[in-house]
Image (cartoon, rainbow, N blue to C red):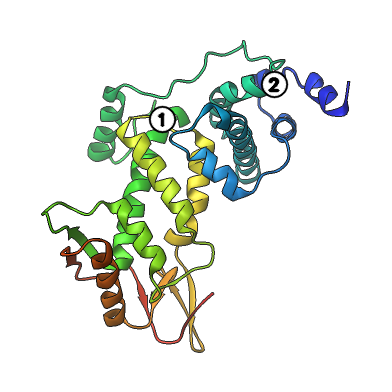
Amino acid sequence: MNKQGQIMNDQADILRRVYSEPTTQECEELITYFQKIGGRTLSSSCIRQNVFKISWTKKDNLLRNRCHVQAAAEYLEFLISTFSVNDKADDIKVLIADIIPYIKQIDVDQDTSFILLSTNTLPSTIHFKHVKELFYKNSLPKDAHRRYDLDILVIYGLRLSLEKRILGFLGIDFIEKSNGGPLLFSNLIPIIKSLTKINFKTGINFDEIKWVLDWLNHHMHRHLRPYPWAIHQAFEVLNPLLLASKINVGDTEHFSFYASTSTQDIGILKKEIESLVQKDNPGAKIYWETSRELFVAKDSIEK
């Protein structure tokens, strides 16, 4: 038996052990196991592209399995390095229940008989109860603080945040096509990628943002509960765009919610946006917002 085979044999019950009584040491062992069966370390971009896929073929399965396992390892490492294992025991259990289908395809010897698989849906009544409590009592129900119950609400919040931020730095309310129909929000991504009059913070990747957007739409419209490690990757993709940061203007350092997107001239930017919109949508009409989520300064330099 080779070394990897021996390690996998020695850890044939690692999922059950961590699920039963998660400790920092057991979680670290589980991360090592995930890394071993996940194979050669894949790039973040490769992992994200496959984790956020909403359609695939049978030939994609092996790579997808590896990407999900490696993303699960990264998420678990984040959990135990940021929080107490005791505080996140439920999250760890949900992660294990969710990852089992991918484990079974890679390591047939792993013990997965101890738990029923997670489902990807929750009854509409549960969602309704949560938002009703949130509105009327400013909190979630006491029995609704499990990762399993809350992840779908995270999807809605992420989708709202992303659309608000993108329309905000463009300064657009909505776009009406020449036939009277709206221009789909997802159609703005190619336009954004062509902009030269906005300075984007390093780390913002609109290819990855488009993967996240499609994934969010898919889960919202099909009412699916997302995998927690995929949500973690979504935050990693969106952090550079949506988090506040610092920006230097000359010798002055500014802190702004919108420092990740800056321009030196709103008027020139509006003309560029209009030109790019008209290029693919002749006759379209842009309805502009009166305010923007955009940092405006001459000689602005990202920090």
> In the rendering, at what x and y percent does residue 9 appear?
80, 19
Front residue of 78/211: it is: 211
Q: From this viewpoint, is residue 40 visible?
A: yes
> Which is more foreground, mark 1 or mark 2?
2
- Residue shown at 57% from the left, 29% from the top: 59
- Residue shown at 69% from the left, 34% from the top: 38
- Residue pointed to by mark 1: 225
**Earlier residue among tags 1 and 2:** 2
Q: Residue furthest left?
A: 180
The span from disc 1 to disc 2 (Cα, nearest Å) is 25 Å
Q: Does residue 68 appear to the left or right of 152 in the view shown? A: right
Please tell me whether residue 259 is drawn above or below residue 214 in the rendered image: below
Q: Residue 5's image quarter?
A: top right
- Residue pointed to by mark 2: 107
Element under label 2?
A: loop
> In the rendering, at what x and y percent does residue 20 appear?
64, 19
Q: Does residue 221 appear to the left or right of 176 in the view shown? A: right
On residue 14, the disc is none
- Residue shown at 28% from the left, 38% from the top: 134
Front residue of 93/264: it is: 264
> In the rendering, at what x and y percent does residue 135 appear?
24, 40
Amino acid beneath label 2: Asp
Q: Quadrant of the C terminus?
A: bottom right
Q: Does residue 58 appear to the left or right of 8 in the view shown? A: left
Q: Residue 133's image quarter?
A: top left
Q: Quadrant of the N terminus?
A: top right
Amino acid beneath label 1: Arg
